[in-house]
Amino acid sequence: MKEPWTPPEITGAIPHGDMPGDKICIDEGHIQKARVLFPALREMIEARSGRTVVAVCGGSGVGKSEIASVLAYYLNDAGLGAYVLSGDNYPRRIPRDNDLERLRVYRQGGLRGLVAAGCVTPEVTASLRALWTADRDADPAAADADAWLSVYQRAGRRALTDYLGTPAETDFDEVSGILAAFHQGAAEIPLKRMGREPSELWYDRVDFSAVRVLIVEWTHGNSDYLEGVDLPILLNSTPAETLAHRRARNRDGKTDSAFTSLVLAIEQQKLEAQAWKARLILSKQGQLLSYADYRRLMAEA
């Protein structure tokens, strides 16, 4: 009979994702969640031959980077060399420009919806510009008095849904190519590094000769566009839990904006649509969930 796993004390440096400037703040909650996941994950890895790609995915602020880092520490301690790759290095635009592109896609889609519905008038144009200036054009409450704004918001949401987490936003082919090279036994792989300015873009050649497990920590780690993931892990959180976590971290200057809430809601819908593929699902409270349990939890949220 296999003896139960005893979590090692974390005494040394913890490997973390390779996103330049990313701040990893590991607390006891992240460690406890990694301890819940690790025994089942290790069993799955050891049942496989050769190298394994694990994806740690979930909504913004759910703890992907931190939990992936602790899992890598435990894998290294167990003699299963691990490396943590940050999928956020692979958008087609730097973060600032991608935020602007998301907003442009939403607003252009909304405008086209107004045109198609025959709702464009000088008065509507002036009102919409005022909403843009106030950053309220995605606010559902603003549409209560104007039927045309509901048309705009529905069309904008459709356009944004067609952009977020797709090849238009992210270079999935490049990440899939990295995973393929890893599976094929490459001893060294060039990995992209992306900062927050256009000039902050380069590649590092990373030694994978002693790496058995590649952990991809990424919102889109369970996407249908990504090939080569063997064991997807979903860190679940409801939209309300995700927003509360972002507020606590003060992750960006517009955490409470209606547009940010819309982005999070669309991300959540896509994560839910992909959840059936996850080999392990962990709740925000740190409990392992079956897929049926997950569906019940999300239905009640």
Image (spheres, rainbow, N blue to C red):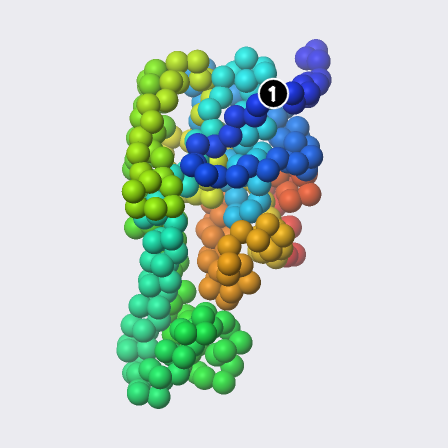
Q: Residue at x 51, y 65 (%)?
A: 257
* Residue 280 visible in this rendered orientation of the protein: no
Crowding around mark 1 (Cα neighbors within 10 Å: few <14, some 14 to 19, many 20+) is: few
Location of the C terminus by quadrant is bottom right
Relative depth, front residue between 220 and 49: 220
The percent position of residue 87, horizontal first and vertical second, equals: 41, 38
Location of the N terminus by quadrant is top right
Identify the amino acid type marked 1: Gly
The percent position of residue 66, horizontal first and vertical second, equals: 57, 35
Image quadrant where residue 229 sits: top left
Question: Is 77 displayed left or right of 20 in the figure?
Answer: right
Q: Residue at x 33, y 82 (%)?
A: 125
Relative depth, front residue between 143 and 208: 208
Q: Is residue 81 above or below residue 66?
A: above
Relative depth, front residue between 48 and 188: 188
**Disc 1 secondary structure class:** loop
* Residue 57 visible in this rendered orientation of the protein: yes
Judging by the rendered image, the residue that carries numbered circle 1 is 12
Q: Is residue 110 above or below residue 182?
A: below
The percent position of residue 258, horizontal first and vertical second, equals: 50, 66
Question: Is 189 displayed left or right of 2 in the figure?
Answer: left
Q: How many marks?
A: 1
Q: Residue at x 70, y 18 (%)?
A: 6
Image quadrant where residue 72 sits: top right
Q: Is residue 53 above or below residue 153?
A: above
Q: Residue at x 38, y 67 (%)?
A: 156
Image quadrant where residue 111 sits: bottom left
The percent position of residue 71, horizontal first and vertical second, equals: 57, 27
